[in-house]
Amino acid sequence: MTTQKSVVEKKESKEIAFVDYIIRRCKQEGGTRAQLSRADNPSTEYQSWDILAGFHVHLDWEDQRLPYALIAAAIARGKVEKNGALGVGSAIARCYANGNQSDQAKMKLRRLLACDTTAEACRIMRPLISLVFSRGITHLDYAALLKDLLLFHWDTHQTRIKSRWAQEFYGKSEQQEGAAHE
């Protein structure tokens, strides 16, 4: 019998394995990097399907295909060397001189938090990732972002994911909040 914890561990390891696999493939094969760079464009996304299918991604399920395609394209375009540790909320704040006090940064975060579907979140995430890369930030936690996007279609997870992104943006971790209330 499989426990809930072992199922979660499997999912985490699959996301990390995918990110590591894509990084390795992009380093080894320039053609793969070019192929995956086109994965987040709806009209050329199909060019990455052989790689995604090889990793057992269900291509006919948009809530799974789009997150994998987005992360693969981000890794390829950003010429990422390894999975980072920076969350999406923190990355958005770091793109602006005033950090989380910037009106533009707040607007970007609010637009992301307004997403209701995985497809919409992936569509909004594309230009955010481009913005992050344009500011020289490539050390996102791609495995965690992939996991978030894969769970985004579940209402029970969506609120938690959005609140974590907001906490990252405003720089308040749950641990800091607990200390502030003591």
Image: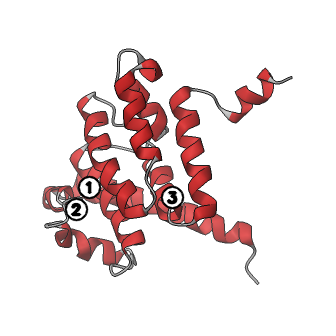
Q: Could you say which is closer to the camera, residue 103 or residue 133?
A: 103
Local SS, label 3: helix
Vertical side of 47 occupied by 136: above or below: above
> Residue 142, image x and y in percent?
42, 49
The answer to whether 179 appears left or right of 122 in the picture is right
In this figure, which residue is indicated by the disc labeled 1?
Answer: 73
Q: Is residue 119 left or right of residue 10?
A: left
The picture places residue 88, in percent across and down from the top left corner, at 45, 40
State whether residue 22 is above or below residue 79: below
**Residues at marks 1 and 3, CA–CA distance in whole angstroms:** 16 Å
Residue drawn where x is 35% and y is 70% of the image = 65
Q: CA distance from mark 2 to mark 1?
A: 5 Å
Residue type, mark 2 in image: Ala
Can you give x and y, in whole percent of width and height, for residue 123 in the image?
30, 55
| Residue type, label 3 | Lys
Identify the image quadrant of the N terminus: bottom right
Circle 2 residue:
39
The part of the image, by quadrant, that contains residue 95 is: top left
Determine the residue positioned at 33% across, 77% down.
54
- Label located before the other in sequence (1 or 3): 1
Q: Say what secondary structure mark 2 lies in.
A: loop
